[in-house]
Amino acid sequence: VSLLARMDPDQKVRVIWLLCLIWCLQEGPDALIRDELRRFCNPEHNRINNFVQLLKLASSTCQHFIPGDGSLPVLCPKEMTQEAFNCLSASVILLIDECFDVVSEDEYELEKLGKSVFDLFLHLLSAPL
């Protein structure tokens, strides 16, 4: 996550890696994604905030597909960009659905997850589609 965060949002390696993540989230079996999210919520490892940070990086990367001044060359149509944002939103909903019970036991982790998810939703909603 930290390596991807240090890259520019329009860097090809970051774009390809995060598009692959979005594709896996969209096309992967729902049960398998839910199992992985439950593992991320495990109090021993607690990698759920890293996953939320990955989703936020994917969101900022997808914003470079929207035609504008500093955007990437249009690689995909507007519908595909919208679908990527829909997939990210659905992933956050799955994350909350699977992890709320585990995370709600620890008030600090619940507040931390709540802030990061709220920040991600604001990031998604601010995309000018």
Image (spheres, grey):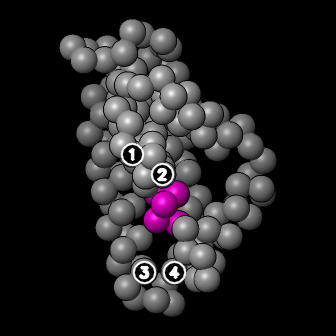
Magenta residues: mostly which secondary structure?
helix
Name the residue that disc number 3 marks.
109
- Specify whether residue 24 is painted magenta: no
Q: Earlier in the sequence, mark 2 or mark 4?
A: 2
- Dot 3: few (<14), some (14–19), or many (≥20) neighbours within 10 Å? some
How crowded pointer 2 is (Cα within 10 Å; few <14, some 14-19, many 20+) is rated as: few
The tag earlier along the polypeptide, 1 or 4, is: 1
Q: Say which mark, if any, is on residue 103.
A: 4
Quadrant of residue 37 within the rendered picture: bottom right
Label 1 with label 2: CB-CB less than 8 Å: yes
Disc 2 marks which amino acid?
Answer: Val
Residue lying at 36% horizontally and 15% vertically, measured from the top left? 72
In the foreground, 48 or 87: 48
* Residue at 52%, 57% in the rendered image: 51
Secondary structure, mark 4, is: helix
Residue wearing tag 2? 1
Q: How far is the residue under mark 1 from the one under mark 2?
A: 6 Å
**Residue 49 placed where, x, y %?**
46, 65
Residue 34, percent from left and from top: 70, 61
* Mark 3 vs 4: CB contact within 8 A: yes
Give yes or no for residue 51 being in the magenta stretch. yes
